[in-house]
Amino acid sequence: MKNRTVQRSSIIGRTAGRLGALSGACLAVLAVAAPADAVPFSDHPGRGAAAFADRATTHANRVHPDQYKDSFTVHELGTVFSVGANNRATAVSAGCSTQHPCRSIALSFQIVTMAGDNVRLNATNLGRAVNEQCPGCQTLAGAYQFVVSTAQPFTLSPEARNQLAAIHRRLDALDTSNDPISVVKERADDLAAQVKALLDREALSAPRGGATAPLAKSGPSVTMHRHYDRAN
C-alpha cells in the first residue's frame, strides 16, 4: 500500500555553530500544516536570519513494497541577511526479493524567495537512494531546490500560487503511476522545468532596488539545483 503524508513547512532555529553563516541570535520557529493537495507556504517577514529544512523519505520493504512520498514547499522570506536552506530526498528499499522487488520513490521540491544584497546563503540539496539486500528493487530519490533572489521583497501572485498548486497535484499523481522509475524521473524533471519557468516570470515583476544596488543592475535571479540518486 502506498503511503503519503501531509507536508509541513517550517522555519527552524539554528545556532551559528550548526550553520556557520547564521548569527548567534535565536531564530523564529514557524510550522504550518497544510492539506496534502495544497502548497505549504511559509514566510519570515522583516530583515533577519532564517533556517528551515524540507524532507521526503520513503522506506520500502516486504510488508510495504511500494512506497512513494513527495514534498512541495514554498518559503517566502522577504528581506534577509542570512539563510540556511536544506532540502533532502531519501529513498530506501530493504529486504525484498528478485521475485517480489520493492519500489521506493522520494521527491522533494523546495522553493525559496529572498530579498537583499549580499545575502549569506547556506543551501543544501541532496537526493540519496539505498538498496539494502534488495536485488532488483527500484529506488529513486530526487531533490529540487529553487532559489529566487531579488533586490526588494515580493510575494508570488495568486495566479502563480494556483499554478504551483496544479504542479503539486501532478507531482502527487505520480504516486499512482506504475511507470518505471526512469519515466517517473522524466516527469519530475518536466514539472521542475515548469516551476523554473513560472518563477522566472514572477521574478521579473519584483520591484527593483536603488540604482546602486547590485541586484538593481543585474536584475533578479532564479537558480535551480537538482540532485538525483538511483539504486537498482
Image (cartoon, rainbow, N blue to C red):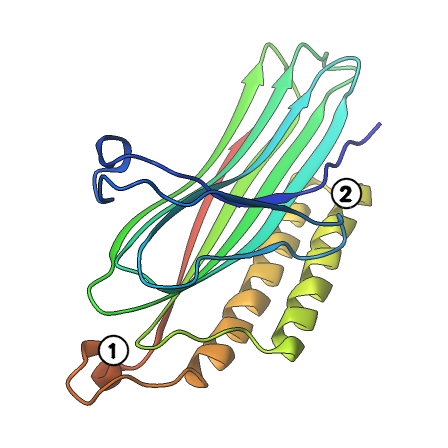
Give coordinates of residue 148: x percent, y percent.
Answer: 40, 67
Q: Amino acid at mark 1?
A: Leu
What secondary structure is found at the residue carrying circle 2? Answer: helix
Residue nearest the observer in this picture, 209 or 193: 209
Q: Residue at x 42, y 82 (%)?
A: 206
- Label 1 vs 2, first from the N-terminus: 2
Which corner quadrant holds the C terminus? top right
| Residue that badge 1 annotates | 215
Position of 132 compared to 213: left or right? right
Q: Which mark is residue 202?
A: none
What secondary structure is found at the residue carrying circle 1? Answer: helix
Residue nearest the observer in this picture, 195 or 209: 209
Q: Amino acid at mark 2?
A: Asp
Up the image or down, 150 lies above or below 231; here it is below
In front: label 1 or label 2: 1
Q: Which mark is residue 175?
A: 2
Give coordinates of residue 180: x percent, y percent.
Answer: 71, 40
Residue nearest the observer in this picture, 112 or 102: 112
Q: Residue furthest bottom?
A: 211
Q: Quadrant of residue 207?
A: bottom left
Position of 73 compared to 35: left or right? left
Crowd band around label 2 with a 10 angstrom C-alpha radius: few (<14), some (14–19), many (20+): some
Position of 146 compared to 73: left or right? left
Which corner quadrant holds the N terminus? top right
Q: Residue at x 15, y 85 (%)?
A: 212
Up the image or down, 200 lies above or below 141; here it is below
Residue nearest the observer in this picture, 226 or 183: 226
Q: How many marks?
A: 2
Up the image or down, 51 lies above or below 196; here it is above
Q: Quadrant of residue 3?
A: top right
